[in-house]
Amino acid sequence: MTDPEDLVERVRDGELRLHELEDHADHDTAAEARRLLLERETATELEAIGDYAFPAETAEPNIENMIGAAQVPMGVVGPVPVSGGAATGDHYLPLATTEGALLASVNRGLGVIRSAGGADARVTKNGMTRAPVFRVAGVAEAAETVEWVDENTEALAEAAESTTSHGELIDVEPYVVGDSVYLRFAYDTKDAMGMNMATIATGEACEIVEAETPADLVALSGNLCSDKKPAAINAVEGRGRSVTADAVIPGELVEERLHTTPEAIAEANTRKNLTGSAKAGSLGFNAHAANVVAAAFLATGQDEAQVVEAANAITTMDARENEGGTTDLYASVSLASLEVGTVGGGTKLPTQAEALEVLGLRGGGDPPGSNADALAEIIAVGALAGELSLLGALSSRHLASAHEDLGR
Ligand SMILES: CC(C)(COP(=O)([O-])OP(=O)([O-])OC[C@H]1O[C@@H](n2cnc3c(N)ncnc32)[C@H](O)[C@@H]1OP(=O)([O-])[O-])[C@@H](O)C(=O)NCCC(=O)NCCSC(=O)C[C@@](C)(O)CC(=O)[O-]
Ligand SMILES: NC(=O)C1=CN([C@@H]2O[C@H](COP(=O)(O)OP(=O)(O)OC[C@H]3O[C@@H](n4cnc5c(N)ncnc54)[C@H](OP(=O)(O)O)[C@@H]3O)[C@@H](O)[C@H]2O)C=CC1
């Protein structure tokens, strides 16, 4: 095996390419050699990037041309009682972010939810999608293709499921645009986020579509999936887990802990999250669900680019008179397309796996799919807490001062 200096020389001489170093040295040495080269070519010192806490080899499925790790501070909020379809009992939620005041805010929201007795949460739909696009001569061939697909879903399922021992094809929804046919395949991917699984399975199914219909595959992803782009189809039809969390907060708790009233929070939610978002043409009718989704994704090894659609949420807040004649706050968050997994992808990396362990959700669930469902429910409750706290801060005019105190 070679030392880093030697590898650097061989790259400089054109004998090796930067991405070939793992073929000539162990993974940590290869990363060190890339850092050395980069330090010299960019006149930098990469001490912090090189100070990572896991064997580089464990990250091989996750990164190419590795030089080290981007370390994002991780904190924890909670505990909060969650009464879910899969999640039960008290949970601490690890969050990784660089935004000061965020964890304080979510922690405050969770504290309020805890004092109110906890939150309910349910996954109401589950399906990871992949939508290939096919070329046909025109609408007649498009109709022929759609008819065949509708009549042969079982054959497609058999082909798709031959590539996986966990994934199950739930549905194939055809869409026609002129001489293009899109087939939106939806899978139950159990505890995996499932994008690799769904892509491999769909590739297999496409071969039968091509053999049995006039359609020719143009691209395995035709953007009706829709992965990593803001898209109404995900908001309406769902993608990954569609999950809702809600809680009823007694008015006196809102006053004591959020320094405002149920009515003021409900009004702020209507004028800001609903009317303001509508006027802005926003797909997101919430305040900052993305904050919790992104921080939970980083902490637990989810695909961070999917925050684009995973944070698509509608927040509702209503002042409700209770039987005792006082007013409660009903609060909910519905995330339409939260793509999460507890196996595969970045979940295997050591720090992310530890964070999943804090949640009690590392690896496959029993039954399969229950760990990913529980993770979705807990993230939804975290997002609900963030919404409650931020709307409280806005209603009590504390947002700017909170960020002066904690965020700078
Ligand atoms: C900052 C607070 C919480 C103060 O709120 P407060 O009520 O003055 O705080 P407190 O000192 O009375 O503490 C109340 C609770 O907050 C938590 N808490 C309090 N401090 C900490 C801390 N250091 N670390 C951990 N937890 C903390 C903790 O749960 C504590 O209860 P305790 O445990 O003491 O019984 C409040 O003003 C707040 O939540 N403000 C909102 C801040 C926020 O949500 N920022 C993030 C989003 S902003 C953004 O990115 C998006 C935006 C705004 O642009 C989107 C949009 O357009 O809307
Ligand atoms: N290919 C693409 O187009 C895209 C890929 N990605 C990337 O895909 C990765 C995520 O894909 P994903 O398919 O989730 O992960 P992996 O590709 O890591 O595959 C996970 C595998 O784990 C196995 N498995 C073991 N236990 C379980 C269980 N309880 N539930 C479900 N599966 C289990 C399954 O094997 P088996 O199938 O044999 O049963 C499954 O296919 C991320 O790294 C992401 O960044 C992201 C976007 C697009």
Image (tube, grey):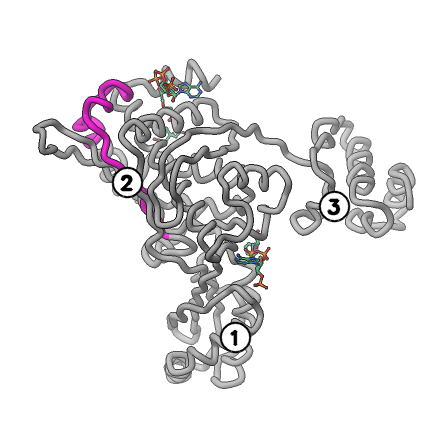
Compared to residue 194, the image places residue 76 above or below, namely above
Task: Note whether ligand 2 is within 8 Å of mark 3.
Answer: no
Q: Mark 2 falls on what kind of element?
A: strand
Looking at the rendered structure, the kind of residue marked 2 is Asp
Res. 282 visible in picture? no
Q: Which percent across, then down, holds residue 320?
A: 14, 34
| 94 relative to 90 in the view: left or right | right
Disc 2 and disc 1: Cα gap in Å? 39 Å
Q: Which residues are magenta?
A: 242-267
- State how far apart marks 1 and 3 are (Cα): 33 Å
Find disc 3 in the rendering and name its residue. 57
Amino acid type of the residue that numbered disc 1 sits on in the rendered structure: Ala
Task: Report x, y in % for residue 44.
Answer: 75, 27
Q: Which residue is mark 1?
A: 205
Instruction: Find residue 298 and report its horizontal and vertical position in percent.
Output: 54, 38
Query: In which image quadrant can residue 393 be found?
Result: top left
Q: Earlier in the sequence, mark 2 or mark 1?
A: 1
Q: Nearer the viewer, mark 2 or mark 1?
A: 2
Residue at mark 1: C-beta within 8 A of ligand 2: no
Amino acid type, label 3 = Glu
- Image quadrant assignment for residue 182: bottom left
Residue beneath the point at 43% across and 62% down: 224
- Image x and y of residue 322, in percent: 12, 33
Residue located at (86% from left, 45% from top):
11
* First of labels 2, 3 by sequence position: 3
In the image, what residue occupies the spot 42% across and 50% down?
A: 373
Taking the image in four quarters, ligand 2 sits in the one at bottom right
Front residue of this view, candidates 333 and 66: 333
Q: Residue at (33%, 27%) from the top-left corner?
A: 389
Residue that carries the numbered disc 2 in the rendered image = 246
The one nearer the camera, 317 or 229, is 317
Report the label total: 3
